[in-house]
Amino acid sequence: MKRSQTLFCGLVATFLLGLWLAGVQSGLGLEIKAQVDLNSDFDQFGSQIPTVQIYEDASGQQLSAFGIYDTGCSVVTWSEYDQFFRPIPIKVPNGAGAEGIGGALTGDVSEPGKIVVVGMHAVDVLTFEYDPNKVAFAPGDPQEHGVQLFVGTSNGSPDLPTITGTPIHNGRLPSFAPEAENGIAAKINMQWGLDLGALVEELVGDIDPAMAEAFEGIFWPMPSVEFVAPNSKLTQIPDDDATLGINESTTAPVRIPLALYGEDNHNDPGDTITASYNPFQNTGVVLSDGGVTIGDDPNDRLAMLVDTGAALSIISTKMAKDLGFDPESSTPEFSVEVQGAAGGIGSIKGFTIDFLELPVDDDGIDGPDGKVLFTNVPVFVYDVLPADTDPEEGLDGILGMNLFNYAYEMLYDPFDDLGPSLSLTFLNDPYQEDLDPELLDELNNLGPLFPQSALSIPGVRGGAAPVPEPSAMVLLATGGLLLLVWRLRRRRAA
C-alpha cells in the first residue's frame, strides 16, 4: 500500500406538485426564509457523503478506505472488510460493544492513530491521488491522544461500514491555522458529482467511442465534503452568476441552530472508543399533516438528530400517532426493507406529511428569526431509541439527507461562535431528469466501483437498505448505516 497520496484502487469505484400552503402556519408564526417543495416519489431518500478515510499509526504508516461522513455517528469506524484487506493495529480485542438495530454489536478497539479525511472533490479517480491541502486531520499525536476506532469483526459486526464520525471535528486543517486549533467545520457541496463522461472517455474513449458517447454529460450523483475553519460562511449565488455551470441560482444562506447530544472523550479515551458529540435540533421542529400540528407548543419540543449518514428521515411511533397515522394498521404510501449492522429487521412504513419546519436563527439573539419550510415530506416510522428512554435525554427522530436533495451547500459547524449550527443554501429552480434506461446495464457494471452510491439508481438497486444504529452507550449514535437509494441526476448545460 502506498502512503498518503495513493488510494486503494479496488475501492474506486419538483417540482411535481406546486404546493403552497396558503394560510398554513405553525403556532410559532415565523417568517419563511426558504421553502423547499419535496417530491414524495423521488425524495424518499437522499445522498450519503463519501470520504476517503486514512488511518496513520504511530510509525507513520498510512492505510486508506472509502468512508461515509456522518454527523449521526459519534465514533470513527473501520469496517470488517477494510480490516481484512488493510488491517490497523488493535489495542483492545473485543473491547467495543453497543446495542444496535437487529441486535448487539461488538468489535475491536484500535490503537490510537491520526485520521486524515479527504472529500471526493479532492480525489483524482484516475490516478487515485488526492490534494493534501484539502484534507482534515483528526486530533493528537497517535502515540498520545490519537483517535481509537471501532473496528468491525466477522462475528460481531460484519456489516458495519467505515464511517467518518464526529471525532473528526476535533481535528485541525493541514495549515494548522490558529482559528482551526480547536476544531473544524464541514462544508458539503450537495450538487457535486463524478463526471462519468470524462472518466469513461479517458478510460475507454480510444477503444470504445460508442460507450464514451453514451456516458457524455452523465454525472454519478454524490456530494463532496470539504473541511473548513469554524465560523466559515456560505454565500448566495445570484441569478446572473453562472458559477454552478447550470444557469442556476441559490437562496440566501439560512442558519439553523443546533444543540449537541452525547459525550466527548477525545482528549483521553482510555481503553474505549474515541467518541464525540452529535448534533440535534430541539427548539423549533414542527411537523403537520391534515391540519394536525405537533412541536409548535414550546412546552412540547421535538428532538431530532441531524444525520448526514441517514438517507431518509424518521419519526417515532408516537409522533406518527400524534399526526394521525397508525403505523400498525395504516396502509403505508411506501416502505423499505431495512437491515441494521447487527442483522435484518424487515420492512418499515413510510408516509408523506404536509410540512416540516426548522427554525432559522441568523444572529443567535432573541430566538428564531424565521423558518425553513419543507412541504410534501416523506418520512419513515421507526423508534430509533427504546420506548422507555428518558424523554429529556432521548431523540424523537432523524432529519435525514432526503430533506436536502435540493440544497446546493451545507455547512455543519459545531464550533460556531453563536452556537452549533447547520447553514444551508438551496437551488431556486430544482430539476430532475429521468435516466436513459439503455444506460442501466453499463451502470450496473460500474456499481461495484462506487459502493456508497450504487443503490441510488433505479435498476441498479438490490438487497435491503441499512438503517441508523442507535447506541445506548454512545459508541454509535443513530445514523451512518443507511445506503443511498436515490436516482441518477443529469446536470443541464449552462
Image (tube, rainbow, N blue to C red):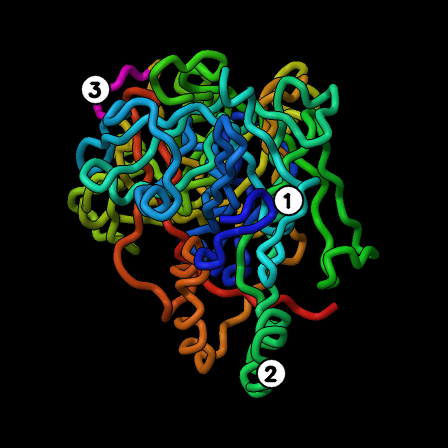
Q: Residue drawn at (33%, 34%), measured in percent from left and top? A: 151
Position of residue 355 in the picture relative to residue 206 (left or right) = left
Tell me which label, 2 or 1, sits earlier in the chain.
2
Q: Which mark, residue 409? A: 1
**Residue 90 position within the rendered picture, expressed as x and y whole percent measured from the top left:** 34, 28
Tell me which label, 1 or 3, sits earlier in the chain.
3
Res 471 → quadrant: top left
Q: Which mark, residue 213? A: 2
For the residues marked 1 and 3, what is the alpha-carbon distance in whole angstroms? 37 Å
Mark 3 belongs to which amino acid? Answer: Asp
Residue 287 makes an appearance in the image = yes
Q: Residue drawn at (60%, 83%), measured in percent from left and top? A: 213
Q: Which residue is mark 3?
A: 388
**Residue 280 position within the rendered picture, expressed as x and y whole percent measured from the top left:** 47, 26
Q: Which mark, residue 265? A: none
**Residue 348 position within the rendered picture, expressed as x and y whole percent measured from the top left:** 24, 47
